[in-house]
């Protein structure tokens, strides 16, 4: 009998399993082996400190972000007083799973099948990878951390089958040699309808390799063709391709994360990826932590309603940021003209400073009210077309 079975071993599930194991709970971490999620791999300093990530997991440290408009105009935004860390999900996720195991979690490798409740007992059924046979784990509670198209969410939580998402696709390539246009300490974000009609493309350094990809929520877009165009325009078409990956990325937190009984969601399964930026690793790990907190509270009190703590704790801290980012995406990602204006707005020093302060610390900065006012007025001017997108 486990206290909790965590389904899904990405950053969210592994974090939940580690936290529960360290608190003395008997926990199993069920994960499919071999799957690598497509991801740019960017993590802020707050994640490094909050979750004690060792230096050896950082494959690169980024000091500049370049925004590229549909017409090819660009603005380089320096990352002051810090850096953006880059991780390779192939190794980072396994590191987190191993750390959970070292904390006392039982690792189980297999594919989730279903949840069965029988005569007061709850079982998680799965197909064991080693034997190919069906098996089951008895448990008191379940954390569903099995991704954007979560089988647990669809089966157990109202609205769990209705998460809006974009499809992300990227190719991991060998990084080009020095002297090329590629900069191993710069992230490029490309806002171009020819690459993505409703999101963006990216070139993110990973040390000896790089992630080149894009995302879209529109049907009929050829993701591989769009990525090939991005590689060509970035001078990376001749680089050796190491692997190719694709997956859905959710863009809105679910209104409910638990089933009122014995299941709570975490990470992509709960929809916690930031709109506009698509940033997910930090929010996934926070989601895993609050799910573990809610599960521990439920186990201690015996009250199923304590599972609601996961969503309430998360949204108390991050709801406003998510709303602001969703508004920005809705305002600026709808056309190339709007994307051109967005990149033009990014030239503003107040925008740059407040954006990265918010990114690094995961809070909207309130220390400079006049800067916020100026940004608001400039934002309105750009959206209304009062300011030309050609102006800097």
Image (spheres, rainbow, N blue to C red):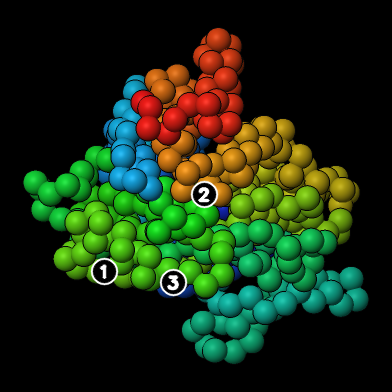
Q: Label 3 belongs to which residue?
A: 222
Element carrying mark 1? strand
Does residue 99 appear anywhere in the picture? no
Per the model, the C-alpha gap separating discs 1 and 3 is 20 Å
Per the model, the C-alpha gap separating discs 2 and 3 is 18 Å
Q: How many marks?
A: 3
Binning the other alpha carbons within 10 Å of mark 2 as few (below 14), some (14 to 19) or many (20 upward) gives some
Binning the other alpha carbons within 10 Å of mark 1 as few (below 14), some (14 to 19) or many (20 upward) gives few
Select label 1 or label 3 by which is in front.
3
Element carrying mark 2? loop
The image quadrant of residue 79 is top left
Q: Nearer the viewer, residue 158 or 20?
A: 158
Q: Quadrant of the N terminus?
A: bottom right
> Residue 38 appears at what percent x and percent y?
43, 62
Q: Earlier in the sequence, mark 1 or mark 2?
A: 1
Disc 2 + disc 3, Cβ < 8 Å? no
Q: Label 2 belongs to which residue?
A: 335
The residue lying at 73 percent from left, 66 percent from top is: 161
Per the model, the C-alpha gap separating discs 1 and 2 is 33 Å
Q: Which mark is residue 242?
A: 1
């Amino acid at each position: 009998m486990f206290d909790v079975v965590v389904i899904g071993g990405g950053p969210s599930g592994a974090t939940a399993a580690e936290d529960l194991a360290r608190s003395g709970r008997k926990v199993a971490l069920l994960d499919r082996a071999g799957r690598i999620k497509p991801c740019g791999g960017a993590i802020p300093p707050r994640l490094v400190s909050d979750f004690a990530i060792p230096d050896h997991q950082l494959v690169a440290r980024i000091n500049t972000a370049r925004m590229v408009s549909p017409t090819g105009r660009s603005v380089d935004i320096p990352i002051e007083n810090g850096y953006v860390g880059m991780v390779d999900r192939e190794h980072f996720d396994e590191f987190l799973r191993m750390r959970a195991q070292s904390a006392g979690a039982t690792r189980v490798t297999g594919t989730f099948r279903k949840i069965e409740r029988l005569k007061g007992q709850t079982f998680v059924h799965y197909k064991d990878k080693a034997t190919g046979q069906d098996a089951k784990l008895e448990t008191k509670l379940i954390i569903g951390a099995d991704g954007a198209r979560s089988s647990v969410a669809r089966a157990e939580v109202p609205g769990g089958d209705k998460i809006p998402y974009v499809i992300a696709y990227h190719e991991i390539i060998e990084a080009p040699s020095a002297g090329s246009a590629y900069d191993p300490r710069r992230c490029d974000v490309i806002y171009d309808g020819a690459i993505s009609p409703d999101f963006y493309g990216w070139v993110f350094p990973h040390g000896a390799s790089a992630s080149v990809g894009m995302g879209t929520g529109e049907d009929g877009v050829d993701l591989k063709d769009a990525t090939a165009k991005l590689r060509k325009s970035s001078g990376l078409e001749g680089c050796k391709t190491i692997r190719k990956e694709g997956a859905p990325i959710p863009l809105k937190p679910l209104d409910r994360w638990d089933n009122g009984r014995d299941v709570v969601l975490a990470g992509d399964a709960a929809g916690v990826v930031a709109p506009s930026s698509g940033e997910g690793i930090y929010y996934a790990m926070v989601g895993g932590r609050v799910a573990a907190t809610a599960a521990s509270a439920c186990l201690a009190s015996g009250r199923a309603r304590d599972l609601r703590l996961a969503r309430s704790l998360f949204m108390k801290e991050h709801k406003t940021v998510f709303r602001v980012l969703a508004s920005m995406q809705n305002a600026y990602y709808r056309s190339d003209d709007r994307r051109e204006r967005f990149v033009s707005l990014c030239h503003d020093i107040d925008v740059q400073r407040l954006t990265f302060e918010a990114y690094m610390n995961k809070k909207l900065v309130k220390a400079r009210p006049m800067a916020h006012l100026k940004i608001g007025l400039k934002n309105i001017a750009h959206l209304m077309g009062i300011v030309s997108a050609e102006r800097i």
